[in-house]
Image: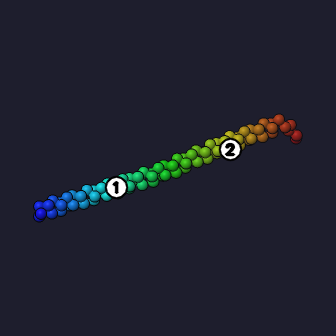
Amino acid sequence: MANLNNQNYALQKELEAFIESDEAVRCGLDRKSKVDHIRNKVDDVIRRSEQEVEERILDQKHRRISDDHRQIAVEQHMMRQPVYE
C-alpha cells in the first residue's frame, strides 16, 4: 500500500509540473498575441500617418503649381496691356 501511495504522490507531483509548464506556455502565447495585436495597431497608425503626409505634400505641390500658373497668367495679361505714358 505504501508503494501505491508513493507512486500516486510522484504522479501528482509530475502532473503539477505539467500543469505549471502548461500555464507558463499559455501565458507566453497570450503575451505574444497581445504584442502582435499592438504591433499591428501601431503599424496601421504609421501607415495612415505616412499617407496623410504624402497627401499633404501632394496638396502643397498642386497649390504651388496652381499659384505659379496664376502668376504666369497675370504676367502675360500685364504684358498684353498697352503702356500709357
Q: To which quarter of the image does residue 21 belong? A: bottom left
* Residue 26 tag number: 1
Question: What is the three-letter code of the residue carrying label 1?
Answer: Arg
Visible residue check, residue 6: no
Mark 2 crowdedness (10 Å alpha carbons): few <14, some 14-19, many ≥20: few
Tell me: residue 49, above or below residue 12: above
Q: Residue at x 35, y 57 (%)?
A: 27
Residue 42 image point, x, y percent: 48, 52
Question: What is the three-letter code of the residue carrying label 2?
Answer: Arg
Q: Where the N terminus falls, by quadrant?
A: bottom left
* In the foreground, 5 or 37: 5
Mark 1 crowdedness (10 Å alpha carbons): few <14, some 14-19, many ≥20: few
Tell which residue pokes out farthest to the front in this image: 1
* Residue 63 tag number: 2
* In the foreground, 30 or 44: 30
Left or right of 24 on screen, residue 51: right
Separation of disc 1 and disc 2 at Cα?
55 Å
Residue 6 image point, x, y percent: 14, 62
